[in-house]
Amino acid sequence: MSTTGSSKQRSLIIILIILGCLLVTFFGLRAFHAFKKFNGHRPPPPASAEIETDVELIRDWMTIPFIARTYWVPEKEIFDALGISPKDNREKSLKEINEEYFPKQDGLAIELVKTAVLAHQPPLTVVPPQTAVPPLTPVPPASP
């Protein structure tokens, strides 16, 4: 009787382990697919963050998504300026894009990206200097 009870218990344990593994696999794959959908979706920068405006800081190791986030320029505008599709090019650096699409024009990709970023930036607004306000001085009494 003890062998039958222990074999039932062993079978139950094996079934529960297999069921647990299936549940972990099922929900793990669901989580993995959900995580892949969020690729490229990042929270917006905090309100206190300043937009980078100096395009001379753009380097050939940067990718289009990185530049788009840093300079707050839609990726589509940068890809349109380069005349290439985002498909299969999002993870490439500007150097790789230049080598693939502009092999005989060294640095053209960086220059096109800089131009696109500059074109998307709002025009500079000049803040007029504050006018000097004379200090308050007592007005001398009028003479009779």
Image (cartoon, rainbow, N blue to C red):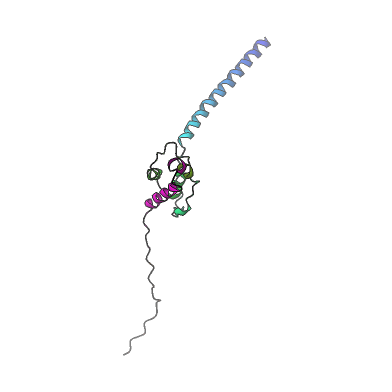
Q: Which of the image's four quarters has the C terminus?
A: bottom left
Residue, far right:
2
Q: Position of residue 100 (x, y in %)?
A: 45, 40
Query: Does the image show residue 72?
Result: no
Residue at 48% x, 53% y is 57
Reply above or below: 1 against 104.
above
Q: Nearer the viewer, residue 57 or 107?
A: 107
Residue, far bottom:
144
- Which quadrant of the figure has residue 80? top left
Q: Which residues are magenta?
A: 98-126
Reply above or below: 93 against 56.
above
Q: Position of residue 102 (x, y in %)?
A: 43, 43
- Which quadrant of the figure has residue 85? top left
Reply above or below: 14 against 73.
above
Is-magenta flag for residue 125? yes
Is-magenta flag for residue 2? no
Total labels: the figure holds: 0
Q: Which of the image's four quarters has the N terminus?
A: top right
Reply above or below: 133 against 82.
below
Q: Position of residue 47 (x, y in %)?
A: 44, 51
Residue at 67% x, 11% y is 3
- Which quadrant of the figure has residue 22? top right
Residue, far top:
1
Q: Nearer the viewer, residue 80 or 120?
A: 80
Residue, far left:
144
Query: Does the image show residue 56?
Result: yes
Q: Position of residue 92 (x, y in %)?
A: 48, 40
